[in-house]
Image: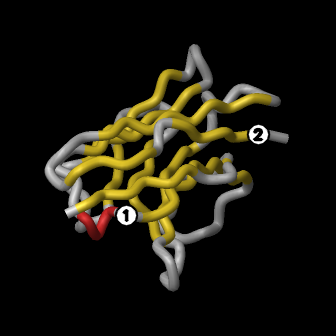
Amino acid sequence: QVQLVESGGGLVQAGGSLGLSCAASGRTISTYAMAWFRQAPGQEREFVAGIRWSAVSAQYADSVKGRFTIYRDNAKNMVYLQMNTLKPEDTAVYYCAARDRPVTTTLAYDYWGQGTQVTVSS
């Protein structure tokens, strides 16, 4: 079992930056693909970014490409999402997810965190 706990959410003005963290416990995530998803009110949960266990490559949703960066520190069992040039449409609850298979943009992840709220004001 893997437990995931997100932190770092909050309120930020449009154009600002925010960094999210995801702390994993229960077992090492060094062989897991990790991802960030988000869900806005009344919307479906959507893929934001994913990173392979080796951190060699990452995938991003078109809507965040060039603004968000996902990275990981396997030694610390942590995954991060740096969000720059934030827009009001980035407002959502952000979730960390893990799976012991390659990254997918679907919701087919084995473990999920409880989410952290990000609100971007205009």
Tag 1 near tag 2, CB within 8 Å: no
Q: Which mark, residue 3? A: 2
Find numbered disc 1 in the image and state the secondary structure of the residue it sits on. Answer: loop
Please determine whether, in this image, residue 62 is positioned above or below residue 66.
below
- The C terminus lies in which quarter of the figure? bottom left
| Amino acid beneath label 1 | Thr
| Residue 95 image position (x, y, % from top left) | 56, 54
The single residue placed furthest to the bottom in the displayed view is 42
Please determine whether, in this image, residue 73 is positioned above or below residue 113.
above
Q: Is residue 14 left or right of residue 97?
A: left
| Residue 70 image position (x, y, % from top left) | 37, 40
Query: What sort of colour scheme is used for the picture?
Result: secondary structure
- Which is more N-terminal, label 2 or label 1? 2
| Residue 61 image position (x, y, % from top left) | 31, 64
Q: Which mark, residue 91? A: 1
Name the residue nearer the viewer: 30 or 2.
Answer: 2
Q: Quadrant of residue 14?
A: bottom left
Name the residue nearer the viewer: 48 or 88.
Answer: 88
- Residue pictured at 62% horizontal, 31% vertical: 23
Find numbered disc 2 in the image and state the secondary structure of the residue it sits on. Answer: strand
Q: Is residue 102 left or right of residue 60?
A: right
- The N terminus lies in which quarter of the figure? top right
- Residue pictured at 56% horizontal, 27% vertical: 78
Q: Is residue 98 left or right of residue 70?
A: right
